[in-house]
Image (cartoon, rainbow, N blue to C red):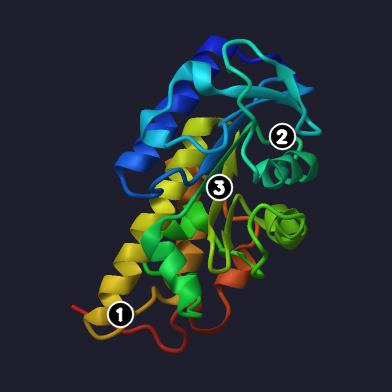
Amino acid sequence: MDRLDEDQARKDLVAVARLCYERDYICGTEGNFSIRLDDANLLTTPRGICKGSLNESDLVVTNLNGEVTSHKGNDGRRPSTELAMHLAVYRLRPEIRAVVHAHPTTAVAFTVAGKPLTKCILPESTLVLGEIPLAPYATPSTEEVPQSIEAGVKANNVVMLDHHGALCFADNIWNAFYLLETLEHHAKTFLIAELLGGAKPLHKESVEKLFAICSVYGMKVPANAAELLKGDKVAHGEKHDRS
């Protein structure tokens, strides 16, 4: 694995963390973010600092056991208490280079209400998010969390944590952030549609057609696409023109 430019990684991580704070995906000192610099080291956010005022020098470098390996400019800061969750992602998915953990209000509200978040209501979110796994509730900052997410991490790049938050991961920190952004946009649209009388999903045939042409958008069929075509996630039966 090639080593990333650490200075650029610090700039990107701080920019994403501040965006998450500005867009209300986190509040207070919530949230944690990381970038895998190389085979042995991570750049991650420290505990107890508001991500809206984060500086590049605040970030911490650790090894894949979560031990601080560089004290350059971090004034003795320690990594997030939830770093083990990130380490689990990197262990289970070696190709992943960045992890974003936030608490997007609408998406989290679905888990609090016990409502499934997966429904094929928008072409973009259907392709980008796929079937969204829900990890069982686990006490934050304990070993319960990395254990709870294992199945979901293997199945998708977006995992919801019951009554807790969202975990998004990708080949770089910006793509992980875009997943989070798409997730919350999907959840908001879903909620508003429900308030307007109920979210009506795309027909199964329409979703299958979307999968067939997704390469046009430079995208791939979701790895768990088969799950999207089951139950009430799509409309079944005769397809009717709604015009």
First-in-chain label (3 vs 1) = 3
Give the residue type that dot 1 points to. Glu
Q: Badge 3 is on which residue?
A: 168
Residue 194 badge: 1
Local packing at callout 3 (Cα closer than 10 Å; few below 14, some 14-19, many 20+) is: many
Judging depth in this view, the residue of 189 and 26 nearest the camera is: 26
Write the residue at 34% across / 80% down: 200
For the C terminus, give its image quadrant.
bottom left
Local packing at callout 2 (Cα closer than 10 Å; few below 14, some 14-19, many 20+) is: few
Judging depth in this view, the residue of 187 and 144 nearest the camera is: 144
Left/right placement of residue 98 relative to residue 186 reads: right
Single out the mark in the foreground, 2 or 3: 3
Percent from the top left, x then y, of residue 121?
37, 69
Judging depth in this view, the residue of 167 and 132 nearest the camera is: 167
In the image, residue 153 above or below residue 10: below
Give the residue type that dot 2 points to. Glu
Q: How many marks?
A: 3
Kindly tell me whether residue 241 is visible in this rendering: no
First-in-chain label (2 vs 3) = 2
Left/right placement of residue 232 relative to residue 224 reads: left
Residue 95 badge: 2
Disc 1, SS = helix
For the N terminus, give its image quadrant.
top right
Disc 3, SS = strand
The answer to which image quadrant residue 81 occupies is: top right
Disc 2, SS = loop
Percent from the top left, x then y, of residue 11?
45, 18
Write the residue at 58% across / 17% down: 75
Percent from the top left, x then y, of residue 239?
37, 83
Marks 2 and 1, how far apart at CA: 37 Å
Kindly tell me whether residue 71 is visible in this rendering: yes
Write the residue at 56% across / 23% down: 59
